[in-house]
Image: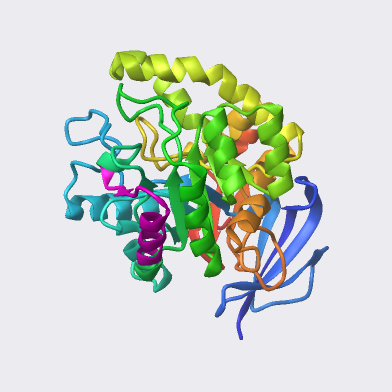
Amino acid sequence: MTTTKYYNFNGFNDKTGDFETNKYVIVNNETGRYVEVGNGAGPSATKSVDFQGKYLMPGLINAHIHVDSDVYNEFGKPNFGVNNEQEHVRAVMAAAHNMKNMLHHGVTVVRNVGTSWMTDIEMARLQREGSIEGPMMVASGAAFSMTGGHGSGGGGIEVDGPDEVRKSVRQAMKSGAQIIKFMVTGGVSAGDFENPDQVQLNEDEVHAGVIEAHKKGIKVAAHAQGTEGIKIAVRAGVDSVEHAFHLDDEAVELMKEHGTSVVPTMIAMKRIIDRPNEVPSWMIERATTHWEAHQKSVAKAAASGVNMVMGTDSGTPFNGFGDESAVEMDMMVEFGKMTPQNVLQSATINAANMMAIEQDYGSISVGKFADFIVMQENPAENMKALQQDNKFVFQHGHAVVFEES
């Protein structure tokens, strides 16, 4: 066994969200896992790397992307359809590019929640076997919506009634889905015929899918933006609510009771609001209408102790696959009034726990994969440190972005 020791850095403590001084780790170069974590200089190893007082934390986990989306088409205009007009080959090419881009920006794990042609399931397999470069991916395949509902025009699977839900969820899992995604409400960018408050799947339908998924240990995510849709999703037993624009006290208490996580994806709406002349009028009006409530809901959930998880909804208008994860984390502090420590946890251990991958990811711990990023500054004091171009990225102990001094 050959090993590499990384030492003289400030290491992330997943329990506090802060950094501890003078840490070291030793990585098994064959398995890509940590074999020792401690304080001080540590024992000798096959190779040693001095990080010279920098800040080391787990690779980021982005829990909400649409990996095969081409945010801009060849004419430089946003692809508002999010895949529904792309051919399969183009979607695969976009996914490969997006995965590499995210990894090079420090995202080492992603949860994909909706694609066309089940592209993400195959891309996840190719990444695991080492055929393509990118984050480890937990893939959903296509999302489930009511007939004519949110996402149905972009490759989603239409289901009506509990029986159709059961069969379709079983088929998705047979095809390799590792997460099931339900579109419980309308949304911001789907067209001027729907809105985030519309309830589109009922509790019986969602619950039927949750039962089938949980039988096989598969987690369930729900796109739910309006208050009633959020409550339906939580009562039905989903593991995470995506977006969650409108949370009242009852919804928050239900989440705490059921152990439901929230993935806010604040950047998705903010990117639309910041480009008012480049989107349809109904889209900017809808985003602007719900933005203030979204900010308050994130703050309410976080302050109440709901498990908060970072995700970007990358693949929506102007919302790409580069530094968007880091920007989202900054927004969670600025607009969601979350503490920097909670935000750092949201992109590491909180996400790993929600996705049930904490045995391999989410913290700097013996036995876990050595996926980590190294920064010049402390992100708990300046979240923009995560957006700096000079950070190092390691995946399974191998350097992705690194300049040894």
Would residue 379 be seen by someone viewing this image from the given angle?
A: no
**Quadrant of residue 186 in the image?**
top left
Q: Residue furthest bottom?
A: 1
Q: Is 258 in front, or is 221?
A: 258
Horizontal and vertical percent for residue 143?
Answer: 37, 49
Q: Is residue 298 above or below residue 357?
A: above
Horizontal and vertical percent for residue 229?
Answer: 52, 35
Q: Quadrant of the C terminus?
A: bottom right
Q: Is 82 in front, or is 365?
A: 82
Horizontal and vertical percent for residue 293?
Answer: 58, 20
The residues colored magenta run 154-172
Q: Is residue 99 above or below residue 337?
A: below
Q: Answer whether residue 165 is magenta in the image.
A: yes
**Quadrant of residue 280 in the image?**
top left
Residue at the (53%, 60%) spot, across then down: 211
Q: Does 104 sit left or right of 81 as displayed?
A: right
Tag count: 0
Q: Does 308 sit left or right of 119 as displayed?
A: right
Would residue 34 be seen by someone viewing this image from the given angle?
A: yes
**Quadrant of residue 376 in the image?**
top right
Horizontal and vertical percent for residue 335?
Answer: 62, 23
Residue at the (39%, 71%) spot, across then down: 130
Q: Is 299 in front, or is 75?
A: 299
Q: Is residue 274 above or below residue 15?
A: above
Colour basis: rainbow
Q: Does 218 sit left or right of 52 as displayed?
A: left
Residue at the (68%, 42%) spot, across then down: 255
Q: Magenta part mainly helix, strand or loop?
A: helix
Q: Quadrant of the N terminus?
A: bottom right
